[in-house]
Amino acid sequence: MQLQNLSVHHPSPVLERTPIRVKEFRVCGMYQVTKLLGMGSFGNVSSAFHVLTGSEVAIKMEVPSDTPTAPVVLPYEALVYNLLRGHPGIPSCKWSGIDRGSHILILDQVGANPQQLRRLCRGEFSLKTVAMLAVEMLDRIEFVHSRGVILRDIKPENFAMGVGEKSDMVYLFDFGLAKLYVDPSTGTHIPFREGRVGLGTPRYASYNVHFGRAEQGRRDDLEALGNVLLFLLHGRLPWQGVYSPSLEAKLLRMGEMKAGPAFRDLLARSPVEFTTYFDHCRGLKFEDKPNYFLLRQLFGQILVKEGWTENTRFDWEDGSSHKGVLLPQEYKLDIRFTKNDVSTLQYVGPYIHYAQIN
Ligand SMILES: Nc1ncnc2c1ncn2[C@@H]1O[C@H](COP(=O)(O)OP(=O)(O)OP(=O)(O)O)[C@@H](O)[C@H]1O
């Protein structure tokens, strides 16, 4: 297929769905809410635009429960966004506070998450695509860790491509379960605790989490990312859909699978770099700093093995040139270069700008 023929703005027959309408109203007097983007465990996220500038944002709202002791998450998440302010690939927080009794967080909008993009790509991501995403995701996680924060809920749905001019950027968002692993008053690592089970999303959680070694650290975020990448590569993880009479038993069973032959079989069906990746993560002690560079290198190695070289160059109609990899069908995940370094990813294809939930 002629790359020049790809029209980025062609509407998608697959994704042209009727948007879920929410009653139109304004937040903070200036943001006109238009539609629902998603529902989380703590509230709804809606799309809105600024009535003067027209800029589009995502508004996360949490209505406090009637029970006064019930935890409120959004003000806490706003603090984390402030800590992470200014880094590319983290939505910037434009405002947070209380409006008409609801906790509000106004954020940059993000687009399709890897799960949705995988479905767009006929349910299959190439190894190159997974490796390219891995490099970017590792960078986001390293940044968050560098600010003294661990995520504790790494899952595909918490990553997304940007929208508009930022559609070439992998974003990391949703910091509702994030936690400081560095004590700000002493600068020391938080102590290790045992006993609490099941925080985050069990499908991707590190095996430690299943066995009550639940005070998570940087190693657990990275192990969870490894599980996310295996999921994106294979489309399924062996511990999905295990049956157990109780949640506790199920978590234990999943943990056993992550520590046993089911996991080894999965690694045997995956590039050897994944084994090195998990060996590194699981070899870390609680307080150890992961070697992010080594982990990124592993996926760079996969890209080279897959035949991706810096000389694979595509020239585009608008005069730009970049280097990329063809996905199944007409979809293309692309690495765009700035100066002489791999910097961002971009999906270029007829449907891609319609990949947001609307
Ligand atoms: N900045 C954003 N731009 C676009 N959509 C967003 C944005 N933030 C959240 N969403 C959408 O809303 C959904 C729920 O948001 P989020 O994950 O932040 O909420 P949560 O209550 O923490 O949910 P969860 O139970 O998944 O942890 C997301 O999966 C996504 O579809």
Image: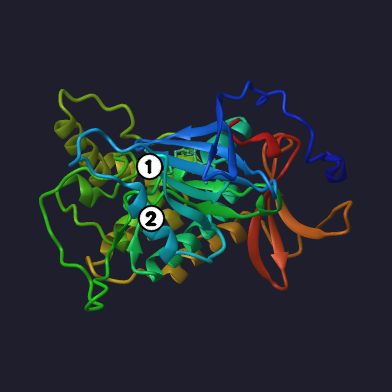
Kindly report the distance in space between the C-alpha atoms of the residues bearing marks 1 and 2. 10 Å
Q: Which residue is mark 2?
A: 275
Q: Name the quarter where the C terminus is drawn.
A: top right
On residue 266, the disc is 1
Q: Give the mark, 1 or 2, whose residue is nearer the N terminus.
A: 1
- Amino acid type assigned to the residue bearing label 1 in the image: Leu
Relative horizontal placement of residue 22, taking residue 290 as reference (left or right): right
| Residue 94 drawn at (x, y percent) | 53, 56
Mark 2 neighbour density, 10 Å: few (under 14) some (14–19) many (20 or more)? some
Relative horizontal placement of residue 279, taking residue 236 as reference (left or right): left
- Residue 328, visible in the rendered structure: yes
SS state under label 1: helix
Nearest the viewer among 308 and 40 is: 40
What residue is shown at x 52% (from left), y 50% (from top)?
Answer: 107
What residue is shown at x 49% (from left), y 54% (from top)?
Answer: 95
- Farthest residue, direction top: 18
Mark 1 neighbour density, 10 Å: few (under 14) some (14–19) many (20 or more)? some
On residue 89, the disc is none
- Asked where in the image residue 335 lies, by quadrant, the reply is bottom right
SS state under label 2: helix
Relative horizontal placement of residue 85, taking residue 354 as reference (left or right): left
| Residue 334 drawn at (x, y percent) | 69, 52
Q: Name the quarter where the N terminus is drawn.
A: top right
Task: Check the image and report above or below for 54 versus 216.
Answer: above
Nearest the viewer among 32 and 234 is: 32
Nearest the viewer among 299 and 150 is: 150
- Farthest residue, direction left: 195
- Amino acid type assigned to the residue bearing label 2 in the image: Thr
Task: Check the image and report above or below for 217 versus 329.
Answer: below
